[in-house]
Image (cartoon, grey):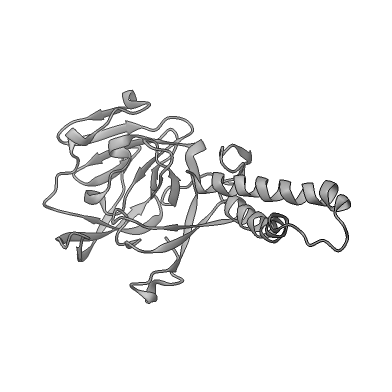
Amino acid sequence: MDFALIMFVLLLITGSLWLLDRFVLQSKRIASTKEPWWVEYSKSFFPVILAVFLLRSFLVEPFKIPSGSMIPTLQVGDFILVNKFTYGLRLPIISKKLVEINSPKRGDVMVFHYPENPTLDYIKRVVGLPGDQIVYRNKKVYVNDVLQEQQPDGDYNYVETALNFVHTERSKENLTGHIHVMLVNPEVPSIHLGAVAEFPHRENCAYSDKEMRCKVPAGHYFMLGDNRDNSRDSRYWGFVPDNMIVGKAFMIWMNFSDLKRIGLSID
């Protein structure tokens, strides 16, 4: 069950019990009688649950990185903070936007509900904005027929959770002015055609052995992982609609395996 929904249910229960006692039961109770345990607990927990619910819903929400799809920007085990109001204020649970503030920008690291299973949250980098023509060819990105330059930056090796050693080539990619670090594995094909799913607006995309070409629909975004050859992203499951956006990742607040990562900003 969604954590926000659980918090909302607890908020309703504790708040209702507190109000019931305050306006109905308290006046009927003998002055010397001790409050029932459920009243005492509700009065204690309601303010805490309310504060956490409002904080997570409208300001900042914590997430943990479970996979290596965003290496080297994000490592497995990173605990990150996500700004919930950067892209507008939304009603919790149903994610309906109340106030428009900013729109996602190319290069942002964004958390969203996974289109194939909205109960899961994913994190990728925004590459395509509404209306963009995105081409992925020879492990390079073209936005509206403009190559997004990649500057070689040495090798990057890491070990996967199954103790598999992975060798990749590291580059600095310039997404129309936003420079970030990304990886490609020279031994892996640009795209696995057999892994491409059917998805909404699939007709906007064309696949071949050499390239993938997609036109981003209005109100949608095209996402890629920084660890390009170890990321299941918009190349395979399509576009992220605006109503599935959670927020913008901005800081690493903890990594128990590497304390030097604490406080790093996410670019």
**Could you say which quadrant of the image residue 64 lies in?**
bottom left
- Seen from the viewer's position, the closer of residues 62 and 151 is 62
Compared to residue 187, the image places residue 153 above or below, namely: below
**Could you say which quadrant of the image residue 89 lies in?**
top right
Which part of the image, by quadrant, shows the C terminus?
Answer: bottom left
Residue depicted at x 56% and y 41%: 93
Report the label total: 0
- Seen from the viewer's position, the closer of residues 3 and 98 is 3
Instruction: Left or right? Give the position of 107 relative to 56.
Output: left
Q: Could you tell me if residue 85 is visible in this image?
A: no
Residue depicted at x 39% and y 69%: 255
Residue farthest to the bottom, as pictured: 260
Residue depicted at x 34% and y 61%: 73
**Could you say which quadrant of the image residue 42 lies in?**
bottom right
- Seen from the viewer's position, the closer of residues 132 and 240 is 240
x and y, in percent, of residue 118 in the image: 43, 38
x and y, in percent, of residue 147 in the image: 29, 45
Residue depicted at x 33% and y 37%: 134
Instruction: Left or right? Give the position of 258 relative to 209.
Output: right
Residue farthest to the top, as pictured: 203
